[in-house]
Image (cartoon, coloured by chain):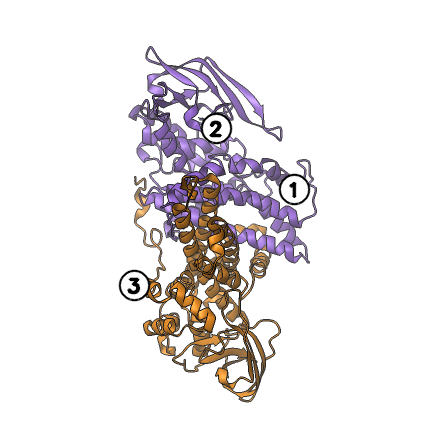
């Protein structure tokens, strides 16, 4: 039934003007289904790295999607970059994909430092870090560095400079893990020789945090999609009292709540991609211009992670609590990602401050048009 | 993802113009400081004069064809108008059901004569409708209605009682779901819909006070009410199918997430005035603002899908569930971070609205299909 009349001659509305490259998504989906298996993820957790998955991903150029080709990246739009991360989230990829491209690749590229061939990690800049630069020498401590030992380069923002250093140059690396068993390491430097260049305007800790929030939220969106599919599938197959548990009203309610929440996060992603794309490409300061959307995206994704994890486990019952079943590969990552690059509370507060600064008379425009409202 | 699909969409230039036009209209008709008391979403004031002004501006019957007095626009255009009106707390009560539900239903199932008789009056903001579905023993389980319609001369004789009939004391017609033939084993068969004039002899409208003392609900008792053949809606025996399409229709509109917008707006105003708002208040504000931002885009996507000729029933159920649950959470989240003792007699409008939101909030997840029923329907779409 098409009730639409005369005003259908439009170019923006009816379809998403900022779609991801479908070939990229399909290729990744196929590749990760084949390589990033439950066994492979379990093994990566045991040894702290997944060389085969990395090699196959790197061969496609996926980790560098969103980094300009001129800077040594794979090019691509915000939609492409976030689609890559969504796929990685959906497959629980145990690798620093966002760190290599959207975060580290961006830092290196913006400072004119060549990208290495291998994986890159970034110092997220948590409280308690004490890095300082004296000439070409780096000293101090950096916490929560993902896969520091396994990466070819550790990239950090220090004293207004983008710094690139090999992990072997560190005085010590203390292995710590996040809730998903992924390395989040404490790295100490004591006068290590580093490559560095001044960070241009707009490349700073705030911008890195925004981009980190985008990356983690995209991973979350992907993992929520997969957890939803897994849970609805399980509830449809699992029979108790002679019928699928999904047909019980109480269970049905759980399924709808978690699926709805996953959809809300997915829409937050798409809306954020649109705002970012309007502001500029992934190599620009678009994240700072779309700060409202980014904050709202991470706040929404964080809540989604909480709701979907809890309800997915509730529906699965005991099987979901075992290592042999794949749900935990998603939920343990969700519980980590929701805290990284700013917790749900942190980003809610950012959105709240923006809303209060906007004031009641223009509040509607803010939630309606986002960062475009004040542009 | 399992089942549902929501596409991102944006306003076209023409749609932005419409939005700005509505904002201009509201700035003129309901100027800030002009004495307009905003309402809470769709339960806002009953104001026929305002409805007629909206109609004159072309904001009613937007999706109805021009040949029936409508504007041959679409679901998105209606979404834009409704969103702007509801967030302003505009007095949409009179035309609300007629515009949202009755118009599309008559267009879909009505006879040519009915379309000509009702649709121009709906689009003119002159004819108002109530919904005659629920009965004392038929709430969520509509197939169990007991109101009967039996064949008379040139029409039908209706007997029975409808309940929770909002606005029956103010509106012109109500659309009544009746049993027209006995249960033949499939209880969804044998139901039919009638458009019954509320001043027909044999109808008694008894008010049922809402918990806050206001008058929305009624019990409508029908004793040998004669309904002429020309007021049968759609096909005799197909009432169940018709009602279900009607319910799916406009489930996902902005009325499902904007009921407490005015309360939120007031709350943000109180924070903006203070210099040292607590982090907890900022976080509550941020959570609410972020969800409005994402939710409205879901609702917008449903409107766009309807205009593209799709039937997004699962998506609509998801939006209604998320939206109405959220509307309630807004009130409670605000209460957690402020020190107020809400009262309808409070000195400020904001506090009065807060009190009203607390008192009427439970209805958000009941009206238009309870959350539990919606989730049962939606889960069928999610299962494989």
Check the image and report above or below for A60 versus B106: below
Could you classify mark 1 by the number of other residues whose Cα lies within 10 Å: few (under 14), some (14-19), or many (20 or more)?
many
| Horizontal relation, residue A310 to residue A43: left or right | right
Q: Crowding at label 2, few (<14), some or many (≥20) Cα neighbours within 10 Å?
A: some
- Answer whether residue A164 is visible to the viewer in this image: yes
Tally of numbered tags: 3
Q: Which comes sooner in the sequence, label 2 or label 1? A: 2
> Horizontal and vertical percent for residue B377?
41, 39
Q: Chain of mark 2?
A: B
Residue that badge 2 annotates: B139
Q: Are marks 2 and 1 on the same chain?
A: yes
Locate residue A210, reporting x and y percent.
51, 66
- Spatial CA distance of label 2 from label 1 is 33 Å
Asked if marks 1 and 3 touch (Cβ < 8 Å), the reply is no
Q: B32 left or right of A319?
A: right
Image quadrant in which you'd find residue A64: bottom left
The residue under label 3 is A23
The hue of chain A in the figure is orange
**Which hue is chain B drawn in?**
purple
Where residue B77 appears, as percent x and y from the top left, is 39, 43
Marks 3 and 2, how far apart at CA: 49 Å
Q: Position of residue A175 (x, y in %)?
A: 54, 75
Q: Residue at x 35, y 55 (%)?
A: A16
Same-subunit check for callouts 3 and 2: no
Which chain letter goes with mark 1? B
Q: Tell me which residue sits at (37%, 47%) in the image.
A: B3
């Amino acid at each position: 039934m098409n009730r639409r009349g005369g005003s259908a001659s439009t170019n923006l509305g009816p379809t998403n003007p900022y779609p991801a490259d479908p070939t990229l998504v399909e290729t990744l989906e196929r590749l990760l289904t084949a390589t990033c298996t439950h066994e492979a993820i379990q093994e990566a957790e045991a040894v702290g790295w997944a060389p085969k998955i990395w090699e196959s991903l790197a061969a496609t150029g996926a980790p560098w999607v969103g980094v300009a080709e001129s800077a040594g990246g794979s090019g691509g739009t915000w939609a492409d970059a976030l689609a890559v991360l969504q796929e990685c989230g959906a497959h629980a990829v145990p690798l620093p994909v966002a760190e290599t491209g959207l975060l580290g690749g961006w830092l290196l590229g913006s400072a004119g430092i060549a990208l290495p061939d291998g994986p890159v990690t970034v110092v997220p800049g948590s409280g308690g870090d004490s890095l300082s630069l004296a000439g070409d020498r780096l000293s101090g401590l950096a916490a929560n560095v993902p896969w520091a030992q396994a990466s070819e380069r550790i990239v950090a923002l220090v004293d207004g400079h983008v710094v690139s250093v090999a992990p072997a140059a560190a005085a010590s690396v203390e292995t710590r893990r996040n809730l998903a068993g992924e390395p989040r390491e404490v790295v100490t430097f004591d006068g290590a020789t580093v490559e560095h260049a001044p960070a241009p305007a707009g490349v700073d800790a705030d911008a890195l945090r925004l981009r980190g929030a985008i990356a983690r939220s995209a991973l979350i969106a992907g993992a929520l999609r997969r957890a939803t599919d897994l849970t609805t599938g399980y509830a449809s197959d699992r029979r108790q009292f002679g019928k699928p548990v999904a047909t019980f009203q109480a269970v049905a309610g759980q399924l709808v709540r978690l699926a709805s929440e996953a959809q809300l996060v997915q829409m937050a992603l798409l809306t954020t991609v649109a705002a970012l794309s309007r502001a500029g490409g992934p190599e620009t300061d678009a994240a700072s211009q779309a700060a409202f959307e980014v904050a709202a995206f991470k706040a929404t994704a964080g809540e989604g992670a909480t709701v979907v994890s809890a309800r997915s486990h509730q529906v699965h019952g005991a099987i979901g609590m075992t290592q042999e079943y794949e749900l935990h590969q998603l939920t343990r990552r969700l519980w980590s990602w929701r805290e990284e690059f700013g917790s749900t509370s942190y980003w809610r507060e950012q959105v709240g401050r923006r809303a209060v600064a906007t004031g009641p008379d223009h509040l509607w425009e803010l939630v309606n048009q986002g960062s475009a409202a004040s542009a | 993802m399992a089942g549902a699909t929501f596409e991102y969409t944006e306003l076209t230039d023409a749609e932005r113009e419409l939005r700005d036009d509505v904002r201009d209209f509201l700035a003129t008709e309901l100027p800030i400081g002009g004495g307009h008391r905003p309402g809470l979403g769709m339960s806002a004031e009953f104001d026929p004069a305002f409805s007629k002004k909206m109609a004159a501006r072309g904001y009613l019957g937007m999706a109805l064809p021009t040949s029936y007095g409508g504007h041959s626009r679409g679901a998105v255009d209606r979404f834009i108008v409704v969103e702007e009106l509801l967030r302003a707390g505009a007095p949409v009560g009179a035309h609300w059901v007629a515009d949202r539900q009755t118009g599309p239903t008559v267009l879909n199932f009505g006879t040519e004569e009915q379309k000509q008789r009702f649709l121009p009056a709906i689009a003119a903001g002159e004819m108002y409708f109530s919904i005659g579905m629920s009965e004392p023993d038929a709430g969520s389980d509509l197939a169990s209605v007991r109101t009967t319609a039996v064949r008379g001369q040139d029409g039908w004789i209706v007997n029975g009682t409808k309940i929770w009939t909002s606005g029956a004391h103010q509106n012109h017609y109500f659309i009544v779901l009746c049993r027209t033939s006995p249960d033949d084993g499939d209880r969804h068969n044998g139901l039919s819909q009638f458009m019954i004039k509320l001043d027909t002899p044999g109808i008694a409208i008894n008010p049922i006070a809402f918990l806050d003392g206001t008058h929305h609900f009624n019990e409508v008792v029908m004793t040998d009410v004669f309904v002429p053949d020309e007021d049968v809606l759609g096909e005799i025996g197909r009432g169940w199918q018709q009602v279900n399409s009607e319910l799916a229709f406009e489930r996902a509109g902005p009325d499902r997430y904007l009921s407490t917008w005015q309360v939120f707006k007031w709350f943000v105003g109180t924070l903006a005035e203070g210099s040292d708002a607590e982090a907890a208040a900022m976080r509550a504000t941020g959570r609410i603002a972020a969800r409005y931002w994402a939710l409205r885009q879901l609702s917008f996507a449903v409107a766009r899908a309807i205009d593209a000729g799709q039937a997004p029933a699962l998506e609509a159920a998801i939006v209604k569930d998320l939206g109405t649950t959220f509307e309630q959470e807004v009130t409670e989240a605000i209460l957690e971070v402020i020190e107020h003792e809400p009262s309808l007699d409070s000195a400020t409008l904001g506090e009065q609205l807060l009190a009203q939101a607390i008192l009427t909030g439970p209805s958000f997840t009941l009206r238009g299909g309870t959350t539990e029923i919606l989730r049962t329907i939606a889960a069928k779409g999610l299962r494989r």
